[in-house]
Image (spheres, coloured by chain):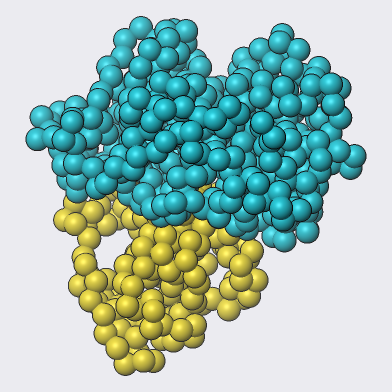
Chain colours: A cyan, B yellow
Amino acid sequence: MAQTMTQKILAHKAGLDSVKAGDLVLINLDLAMANDVTGPVAVNVFEKGNLTISDPDKVCFVLDHFTPTKDIKSAQNCKQVREFSEKHGIKKFFEGGCAGVEHALLPEMGIVKAGDAVIGADSHTCTYGALNAFSTGVGSTDMAIGMSKAKAWMKVPSAIGFNLKGSFKKGVSGKDLILYIIAKIGVDGALYKSMEFFGDGVSALTMDDRFTIANMAIEAGGKNGIFVADEKTIAYMEEAGVKEYTTYTPDSDAPYEYVMDIELSEVPYMVAFPHLPSNGKTAEEAEALSVKLDQVVIGSCTNGRITDLRIAAEVLKGKKVKDNLRVIVIPATPKIYKEALNEGLLNIFMDAGCIVSPPTCGPCLGGHMGILADGERAIATTNRNFVGRMGHVDSEVYLASPRVAAESALTGYITAPKN
Amino acid sequence: MNVKGNVFKYGDNVDTDVIIPARYLNTSVEKELAAHCMEDIDKTFVTKVANGDIMIGGWNFGCGSSREHAPIAIKASGIDLIIAKSFARIFYRNSINIGLPILESEECVNDAEAGDIISADLSKGIIRNETKGKEYTTTPFPEFIQEIVECGGLVGYAQQKL
């Protein structure tokens, strides 16, 4: 039976020859991960249920959301997860200088890889699909069972195919593409479905573009986003120290509900307006509306990687950000931070008048390190612009790529790059 | 299991950030979460909701963050059932896993207004809007999910079956 990439991985992990959309299957997991927000709830469920851990090597905690801890309650949560990890011999426990934004950290450490089945108590766990893995976000109870049994139940999803062709116009990036797609299909356009990316255009995308795109599959309601693997995928995994992996391709007659052909050269710079990621406009349309900004955030599991910082630095080099504008740059992991330091990017940011933050999810979810007051507006390279997402209920978040965010940092208004 | 209560009605794409904003995610205590449930879109919800009440939403209810704090906050606020046109998938899983009943019925959602009295027979998936005098039939959960519900949630299921 013809299958999608996702279906092939699920079939393999369920010990079956094949599966089809709608089947309910119990799969073996390669990893179950959680953070300092969802971890404590999972630990509570685990302990209340008197559960045990079958394989501590398949459990991972990254303390990244409210860290460095923003208040006493957050510190207590981290302490609870730290003590739990010590007690159960969980080695994949990352905090402090070893921690970064989880979905940037795990791929660069080689902890997730092609062919894996991963659940994470964080909705953006779908990021690892960039590596040709099946990965999906779940809640804390699923996490508790996942870390106990290394298993999860899954309803096999149907899928939408995205056939990427050609290459982007200079400057356009993965963020523009995913905002463009979500604007077309809506925030529930891929509800319960896989978003599978293939076609000759994939090779034109950097790995960081692919992480950004897979990361935001959830913003279209998707169960997972997944890319075919190519030389760039393999090179990325090898650099991360991955020795063994399995890649999957879709069958030529895979049962996609539909396949959307996308000419990458036709994708414009995009900005998603409040309060849904699907409220996309082209950056030119956005610029025409003279949206005045109070803050710019460049970071997150969506766009806090080294390529993103290089792009922002290229725009900001030798210039000054607009007066009275807070521009916060957040390298997603210590490795990215160090690379940015060694490449002189942090100097460029600081000379331009930016704040450079330690790795954290921080303001993306309204945690800390850049919370908005009432009436304030931010352009952010993050993933959600829901009501109150970055702070006050009457604040606004506009989603964009690092290049559009950096251009806007210079003017204080949402600004389209002029190529 | 039967439920009956007052309707609180919201629109499409009710996201987990408005169900429980991240500024309250430094706790996992149910009552503390419930005290702030829905406050960014409905400041009066927590003052009006009573045990047994019913929440109604449109398409894609519970989209966004995977925070289980969201269904926990709703359940702890006293809500016994959510009816929506559709649910975002992580919220759907989480609700089943913690034993918060959910039903999908586009017609019921279209007809219902805030303050209506709705009753439901959860095992049969039948909803009755007592105020409007109308009845709706929903598709029951697949057998596998019913088993999870019968085990009292995923933990019970895992203890007995995995």
Residue ID at (74%, 35%): A407
Q: Is residue A69 visible?
A: no
Q: Please tell me which residue lies in front, A143 or A88.
A: A143
Labels in figure, total: 0
User: Is A20 on the left-hand or right-hand side of A283?
Assistant: left
Quarter of image, res A90? top left
Q: Nearer the viewer, residue B137 or A150?
A: B137
- Above or below residue A319? Residue A139 is below
Q: Residue sitting at 22 percent across and 60 percent down?
A: B141
- Above or below A305: residue A3: below
Quadrant of image for the C terminus of chain A: top right
The residue located at (45%, 22%) in the rendering is: A204
| Image vertical order of residue A371 relative to residue A113, above or below | below
Q: Give coordinates of residue A234: x percent, y percent.
A: 38, 12
Tell me residue B4's x, y (percent).
37, 81
Left or right? Give the position of A129 relative to A68: left
Percent coordinates x, y for residue A21 in the rendering: 19, 45
The answer, for residue A231, to whether it is visible in the render is yes
Identify whether A253 is placed above or below A371: above
- How far across and how far down the image is residue A323, in percent? 90, 39
The foreground one among A378 and B132 is: A378
